[in-house]
């Protein structure tokens, strides 16, 4: 069973970050640090056994800029 953090990061990376012009552009568009985008990517790709414990505030910020409520995001992810 995949962890909640992995599932969230994988969804964000595969559906939004990969479709963005760049990681830097995604960060700027969602008012988060580029380092956070890298952490999400590394978790989604299971790089070096790294898993980012994504804060709810960060997730809320990303959802805000995508015009989503948190419950809508969790529904999309299947949680």
Image: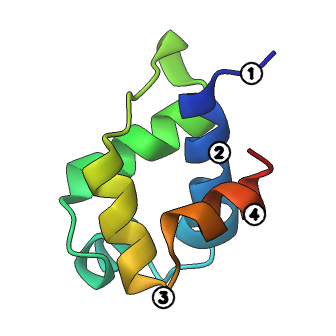
Q: Which residue is mark 4?
A: 76
Residue 2 — which label?
1
Q: Nearer the viewer, mark 3 or mark 1?
A: 3
For the residue labelled by badge 2, is the local secondary structure a helix, a strand or a loop?
helix
Disc 3 target residue: 67
In primary-sequence order, the first of circles 4 and 1 is: 1
Kindly identify which residue carries mark 2: 10
- First in sequence: mark 1 vs mark 2: 1
Residue 63 percent across, percent down from the top left: 44, 72
Which type of secondary structure does the marked residue at label 1 adopt? Answer: loop
Report the front residue among 65 and 46: 65
Q: CA distance from mark 3 to mark 2?
A: 19 Å
Q: Judge left or right: residue 77 versus residue 39.
A: right
Measured Cα–Cα span from mark 3 to mark 1: 27 Å
The tag earlier along the polypeptide, 3 or 2, is 2
Residue 35 percent coordinates (x, y): 23, 48
Cα separation between marks 1 and 2: 10 Å
Q: Nearer the viewer, residue 46 or 73?
A: 73
Marked residue nearer the N-terminal end (3 or 1): 1
Please tell me whether mark 2 or mark 4 is closer to you in this view. Answer: 4
Query: Residue at position x 18%, y 59% from top?
Result: 33
Kindly indicate the quadrant of the structure image that contains residue 12. bottom right
Q: Separation of disc 4 and disc 3 at Cα?
A: 13 Å
Q: Residues within 10 Å of mark 4 (few under 14, many from 20)?
A: few
Q: Residues within 10 Å of mark 2 (few under 14, many from 20)?
A: many
Q: Give the position of the N terminus as an image quadrant.
A: top right
Q: Nearer the viewer, mark 4 or mark 1?
A: 4
The answer to whether residue 68 is seen in the rendering is: yes
| Mark found first going from the N terminus, 4 or 3 | 3
In the depicted structure, whether residue 35 falls above or below residue 18: above
SS at mark 4 in the image:
helix
- Tag 1 and tag 2, C-beta contact below 8 Å: yes
């Amino acid at each position: 069973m995949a962890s909640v953090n992995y599932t969230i990061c994988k969804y964000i990376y595969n559906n939004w970050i990969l479709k963005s012009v760049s990681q830097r552009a995604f960060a700027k568009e969602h008012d988060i640090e580029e380092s956070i985008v890298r952490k999400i990517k590394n978790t989604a790709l299971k790089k070096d056994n790294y898993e980012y414990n994504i804060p709810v505030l960060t997730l809320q910020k990303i959802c805000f800029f995508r015009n989503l409520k948190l419950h809508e995001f969790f529904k999309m992810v299947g949680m």
